[in-house]
Image: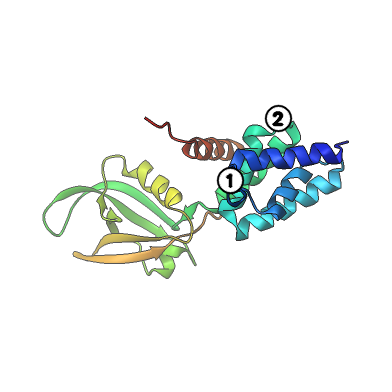
Amino acid sequence: MLSPMNRLFMLLALFSFMGCNLEAAPDPEISQRIVLLADPSFAARQKAAADLRELGMKHREEVEKALIDAYRHSGDPEVQFRSREILTELFASSLGYIGIKYAKREHITSQGEKRWVILINDVQIDSPASKAKLLTGDVILRLNGEVLDAEADTKFPLKIKSIGSGSVVNLLIERNGEEKRVPVTLGIWPRPLSVSEADALFLSKIRSLEPKPIH
């Protein structure tokens, strides 16, 4: 069982990982829940994890930072496991979703240019694409001003996911020979991730958040 002193040590250690001054430390409510992830009581650990999930929806950045530090520095397998589990859920809830089925193809635009494009084959009901009034047969020429290339079939969905839910993407589409700009507010990725997808997402996010070396 963790003594009060050990709990205090863990809490102070978390503060030190996040910075030396009080402003850099996480909110005490978040820190307290992270300390409880190592509680000997299974019920207390479950409650702390549930609380952190809820706090993460309201204070995502702060909770993610505290959990990442706990995962990296705790040394307690239970804290690391729980931190990774909660982080993966938070990361997944931030993935962008547009809601189309599509195919990559070469296309001659209305301007006579040959380009790689995304051809929309189907628009999911009640999806962000549907709400933006995208239609089957629309041709996506640009995403946020960037032209597509020969790897559009893999790059397009990755960019949508990484841009994130709640963000607005600007599409340049061609419909019936006319170009049109369409803003789309991305939704939340709607399906559970497989184990391999969750692992890949967690590792890529952790790597992307690693401090950059100072030259």
Q: Which amino acid does label 1 sit on?
A: Lys
Position above or below: 143 against 11: below
**Dot 2: what SS?**
loop
Q: Which residue lies furthest to the front in this view?
A: 21
Mark toward the start of the polypeptide (2 vs 1): 1
- At 17% from the left and 56% from the top, the residue drawn is 109
The quarter of the picture where the C terminus appears is: top left
| Residue 184 horizontal side relative to residue 210, left or right | left
In this figure, which residue is indicated by the disc labeled 2?
A: 75
Q: Which amino acid does label 2 sit on?
A: Gly
Residue 84: in sight, yes or no?
A: no
Q: Which quarter of the picture shows residue 17? A: top right
Residue 212 numbered mark, or none: none
* Residue 27 position in % (x across, y down): 66, 54
CA–CA distance in space, label 2 to label 1: 17 Å
- At 70% from the left and 53% from the top, the residue drawn is 28
